[in-house]
Image (spheres, helix red, strand yellow):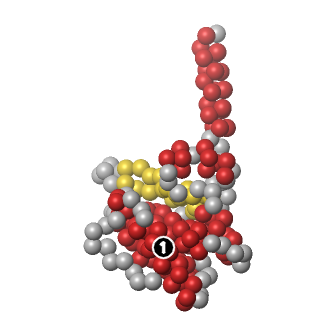
Amino acid sequence: MGRRLLFLLAAVFAALVAASSASTYSSNTTIDATATWLAMRPVTVRCLTQQESDEDWVILYGAAAYVEGTFNAKGRWVPFDYSVFMYGICETIEAYQLGEPVLLKEFAWAVLVLTHESGHLRGWKWASDEARTECWAIRHTRYVAQHLGMTDPAALSAVMTEALRLHNEMGWNYHLAGCKLPTP
């Protein structure tokens, strides 16, 4: 009888943990397609709700987005096939695509985050290195803005100027010595 009770309690606890970690994130076909294009493999972006962002420990720690992964037998980090974005990033890209007004700073940040996290999703040998990934991302930000529908050269230049400003404000671990930054 004691074992059955212990098993029942364990099952109830497991169900409660699973229910509390259940996610209602959304995804966006264009964002997924852009991430897949950049990662050079099928990937998705999990766009968290505001509540999920408020409860996600990685986001609460200060990340705008992240990619989970594991280490293989050789000790190399291998990303899973998805990234997780805090609330607001996907919404900014979606608003831009719908022709709604978005702040330049928010759009540039959303594009930079999408590009950066897609760099991690590539899974190349440098994919676990924030500085190398950021160097790659800032050099591809303009192309991602174009892929998302931005065609006006002045707007692309403004996005790049803002993305470079945001990049320069990032912590030291996002700056690679010798990274050739693009011009706006």
Residue 138 percent coordinates (x, y):
43, 73
Residue at position x 52%, y 57% in the image: 65
Residue 64, position as x, y percentages in the image = 53, 57
Picture residue at 62% right of the left edge, 46% below the top: 54
The front one of 84 and 77 is 84
Determine the residue located farthest toward the bottom in the rendered image.
153
Identity of the residue drawn at 53% across and 78% down: 159
Instruction: Classify 86 as above or below 114.
Output: above
Q: Nearer the viewer, residue 34 or 66?
A: 66
Q: Secondary structure at mark 1?
A: helix
Q: Quadrant of the N terminus?
A: top right
99 on left or right of 107: right
- Total tally of numbered discs in the picture: 1
Quarter of the figure with the C terminus = bottom left
Residue 115 visible here: no
Q: Amino acid at mark 1?
A: Ala
Q: Residue sitting at 53 percent across and 44 percent down?
A: 57
**How crowded is the residue under tag 1: few (<14 C-alpha within 10 Å), some, or many (20+)?**
many
Residue 137 in percent (x, y) is at 43, 71
Farthest top residue in view: 1
Q: Is residue 47 left or right of residue 78?
A: right
Q: Quadrant of residue 153?
A: bottom right
In the image, residue 77 lies at what x, y percent?
A: 37, 54
Residue 139 visible at all? yes
Residue bearing mark 1: 163
